Amino acid sequence: MSQATRVLLDSMVNVPALVLGRRMDILAWNSLSSALFTDYSRLPAKRRNHIWLTFLAPEVRGLYANWEQIAQECVAYLLMDAWPLPELARLVGELSLKDHDFRRWWADHKVRSQRQGRKECVHPVAGELSLDFQVLDVRGATEQSLLVYTEPHSPSAQALTFLAGWAATELPARPAQASSSTGEPADETKRRG
């Protein structure tokens, strides 16, 4: 990830934002996305995957009021780039073994690229949020995209502002960079050292 993308991500203090890799690996995040979804820095690098978290992390799965719709969209998106990536095959294999819904929707073969939409969340601290999202390509970075959640001038915007303040005081400061210069997840100890 480029330094310019890192600066942009860090400057987005009032909106949750993530930098995603090709198979929806979470390469970097800002503090508000950690406050909204989960503390990514506490997860092993192989678990920092948007689809894995949606299906197999109870705290993330329980966050979505419209989980079934979100989960089906994740499967449809994943089907677009399904093969021949070995690491994607491992992710699909694990999700297929551990989640009946994933297995059923994967077998349906419904392919869809969703670059924008709306997600309904029920956050344990901030309450109900109705958020628009956009997926933007990061120019100059192969297979990276920026996922941004917004909701201006609404109760959800007020809840995000509250959550940003809560995150600033309640969550420990942690590095938000999750990948090395090669695009591979960095070892947590190496990033801190």
Image (cartoon, rainbow, N blue to C red):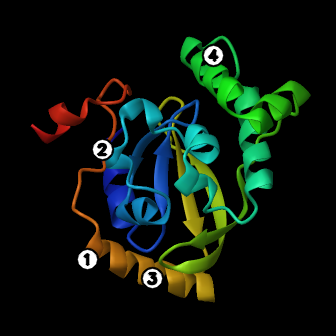
Disc 1 element: helix
Q: Residue 85, image x and y in percent?
A: 60, 14
Give the mark nearest the N terminus, 1 or 2: 1
Q: Residue at 50% across / 29% down in the picture? A: 142
Q: Residue 121, image x and y in percent?
A: 64, 68
Q: Residue at 80% across / 53% down in the picture? A: 69
Q: Which of 141 and 28 lies nearest the eye of the viewer?
A: 28
Give the mark nearest the N terminus, 2 or 3: 3
Give the mark nearest the N terminus, 4 or 1: 4
Q: Can residue 165 be seen in this view?
A: yes
Q: Which amino acid does label 2 sit on?
A: Gln
In the displayed structure image, the side of residue 83 where residue 12 appears, left or right: left
Q: Which of 76 and 97 lies nearest the eye of the viewer?
A: 97
Compared with 11, 41 (above or below) is above
Where residue 89 is drawn, which disc sits there? 4
Q: Is residue 154 visible?
A: no
Q: Quadrant of the C terminus?
A: top left
Front position among marks 1 and 3:
1
3D distance between C-alphas at marks 4 and 2? 25 Å
Q: Residue 158, image x and y in percent?
A: 52, 87
Q: Residue 75, image x and y in percent?
A: 75, 36
Give the mark nearest the N terminus, 4 or 3: 4
Q: Which amino acid does label 1 sit on?
A: Thr
Q: What residue type is labelled 3?
A: Thr
Q: Which residue is at the far left?
A: 193
Disc 2 element: loop
3D distance between C-alphas at marks 4 and 1? 40 Å
Q: Residue at 44% across / 56% down in the picture? A: 38
Where residue 177 is drawn, which disc sits there? 2
Q: Image quarter for residue 165?
A: bottom left
In the displayed structure image, the side of residue 181 where residue 141 appears, left or right: right
Compared with 85, 53 (above or below) is below
